[in-house]
Amino acid sequence: MPLVTSKAMFEKAYAGKYAVGAFNVNNMEIIQGIVEAAKEEKSPLILQVSAGARKYAKHIYLIKLVEAALEDSDLPICLHLDHGEDFDICKACVDGGFSSVMIDGSKYSFEENIALTKKVVDYAHSKGVVVEAELGRLAGVEDAVKVNSADATYTDPDQAVEFVEKTGVDSLAIAIGTSHGAYKFKGKPELDFARLEKISSMLPNFPLVLHGASTVLPEFVAKCNEFGGNIAGAQGVPEEMLLQAGQLGVCKINIDTDLRLAMTASIREHLANHPADFDPRQYLKPAREAIKNMVKHKIRNVLNSSNRL
Ligand code: G3H
Ligand code: 13P
Ligand code: ZN
């Protein structure tokens, strides 16, 4: 099975009012855990690679691991660049075998974001690759991007329409109150659903993307803390809010923090309970299983994407 773009996935998700999970990958165990879950759930799947992941694992290793996953699983998988910060990284991923790229021009002015996104769209489309862009700014930390909550701005619906028209982009990440990382809300979680509804109604049949959409599962935070971690005050997006977003035109839901927490909780628990173990397979095997179970839970309860192939 070759890589696929997200085009057909998003069309089905939009019509079926569910979302496709986009999971960040950095190594073999993470890829295997996610892919096994999607295969068992018969779910569409996007694997995404950040600039940091490319730096950590190298483009060639990630591509080859995803090729192995395609061959081994026979699943249609979309391979996506997450938060491409300039034309060059998008071009490298288009030329290097990805089927989808994100150009994140959200830190630029509206006009500069349009110009940069359009340049990436023109190049990517000429090679059959789809493009996601971002309008509005999420708070939180990414490898290359750090945004204070004061600098975060929600997406303007009129601008969203103009942006999509002028760039020809295939999907758009919007800011409605989510943020990257494990600390998303200080008090009660709140997302601006009125804004999402407005954007969605002004861009009918157009796939929207929600970044910063980990739920920060309390069981993993508790396990990390129980076995020597120090993750205080972590809070994610409630599951029911993500299900609601899936009904309102959000076709792609980005999840990284929950993978990190599931893996780290499992490794911490294993090493605390088996202090004599030092073979990495002894703790990476349960960590891979923890990822698989967590992703299956997401597919069933948050994305609603089981049996959608
Ligand atoms: O949105 C960012 C993702 O969580 C990727 O994080 O840049 O540290 O790999 P990273
Ligand atoms: P989380 O930090 O909520 O997992 O978001 C990940 C993300 O948006 C990757 O682009
Ligand atoms: Zn993101």
Image (spheres, rainbow, N blue to C red):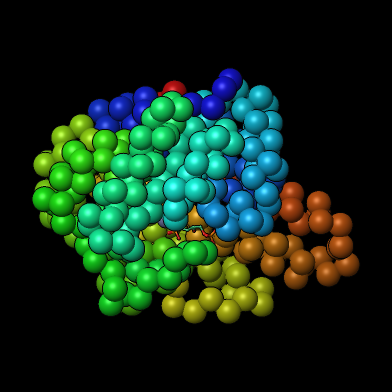
- Report ligand 2 position as a quadrant: bottom left
Specify whether residue 154 is in view. Answer: yes
Q: 189 or 180: which is nearer to us? A: 180
Residue 241: quadrant of the picture: bottom left
Task: Between residue 307 and residue 174, name the one nearer to us.
Answer: 174
Residue 287: image location, x then y, percent:
68, 53
Quarter holding the C terminus is: top left
151 on left or right of 65: left
Q: Which residue lies at the image location 20% right of the left edge and 32% below the top edge?
A: 205
Residue reaching furthest to the top? 1
Question: In the picture provided, is 152 more to the left or to the right than 218?
Answer: left
**Residue 21 visible in this rendered orientation of the protein:** no
Q: How many marks are shown on the rendered structure?
A: 0
In the rendered image, the quadrant that contains the N terminus is top right
- Placement of 141 over or under 124, stated as above or below: below
Q: Residue at x 49, y 64 (%)?
A: 144
